[in-house]
Image: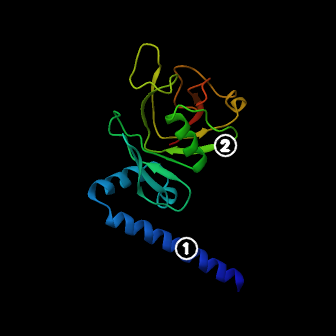
């Protein structure tokens, strides 16, 4: 009987979280609904449905919809030439904040990120490049997931080419504090 009560309590909590997310989405402006829809494309529906949705702006990050599962999803960046919404767990969010802040990511915090809508062009060698140049090895990736924050030795078993084959796992930004494993998915 106690298992039934625990199961019912868990179900009630899940329904409550879903209802809160749905109510937030229903009360959102048309612009926020567009951001939510874009951000939710980054991860499987079972992840994005209960993820926090944020928008990155010139004044920092704004929460568009609060979530309950520890994942944070960001909408497509309209400045980039193609789709690039992403969704990440808490450790990956810390890693991303370190990268954006030009700080060293915390050691020993492995994170996971989804970019199931793909990624737009980016330099494979310079974490801060904002446009292609003769030396920054611009690449375009399709649907992929990423592992960030692993020990440097973890990345040693994967290709670190400046111009990688993006159809197989490879290391992006090798040799920098922000190196991470890119894993294509279909």
What residue appears at the point 68 percent right and 37 percent down from the top-left corner? 107
Question: Residue 109 — which label?
Answer: 2
Callout 1: helix, strand or loop? helix
Task: Provide residue 176's location: percent of width, then percent of height.
Answer: 60, 25
Callout 2: helix, strand or loop? loop
Residue for badge 1: 13
In the picture shown, does residue 107 fall above or below 69? Answer: above
Task: Provide residue 2's location: percent of width, then percent of height.
Answer: 71, 83
Label 2 Cα neighbours within 10 Å, binned few <14 / some 14-19 / many ≥20: some
Task: Provide residue 178's location: percent of width, then percent of height.
Answer: 58, 31
Which of the two discs, 2 and 1, labels the residue nearer the N terminus?
A: 1
In the picture shown, does residue 85 fall above or below 30? Answer: above
Q: Are marks 2 and 1 in contact (CB under 8 Å)?
A: no
In the picture shown, does residue 27 fall above or below 162? Answer: below
CA gap, disc 2 and disc 1: 28 Å
Residue 57 appears in which quarter of the rendering? top left
Q: Closer to the camera, 165 or 89?
A: 89
Residue 53 appears in which quarter of the rendering? bottom left
- State left or right for residue 92 relative to residue 120: right
Task: Provide residue 162's location: percent of width, then percent of height.
Answer: 54, 19
Q: Which quarter of the image is occupied by the N terminus? A: bottom right
């Amino acid at each position: 009987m106690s298992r039934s009560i625990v199961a019912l309590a868990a179900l009630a909590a899940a329904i409550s979280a879903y209802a809160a997310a749905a109510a937030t989405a229903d009360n959102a402006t048309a612009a926020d609904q567009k951001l939510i829809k874009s951000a939710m494309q980054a991860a499987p529906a079972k992840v994005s449905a209960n993820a926090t949705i944020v928008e990155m702006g010139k004044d920092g990050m704004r929460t568009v919809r609060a979530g309950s599962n520890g994942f944070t999803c960001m909408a497509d960046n309209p400045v980039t030439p193609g789709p690039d919404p992403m969704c990440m767990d808490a450790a990956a969010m810390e890693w991303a904040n370190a990268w954006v802040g030009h700080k060293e990511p915390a050691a020993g915090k492995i994170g996971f990120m989804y970019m199931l809508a793909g990624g737009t062009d980016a330099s494979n060698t310079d974490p801060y490049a904002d446009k292609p140049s003769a030396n920054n090895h611009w690449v375009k990736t399709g649907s992929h997931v990423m592992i960030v924050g692993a020990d440097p030795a973890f990345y040693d078993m994967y290709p670190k080419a400046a111009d990688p084959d993006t159809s197989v796992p490879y290391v992006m930004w090798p040799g920098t504090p922000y190196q991470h494993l890119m894993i294509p998915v279909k």
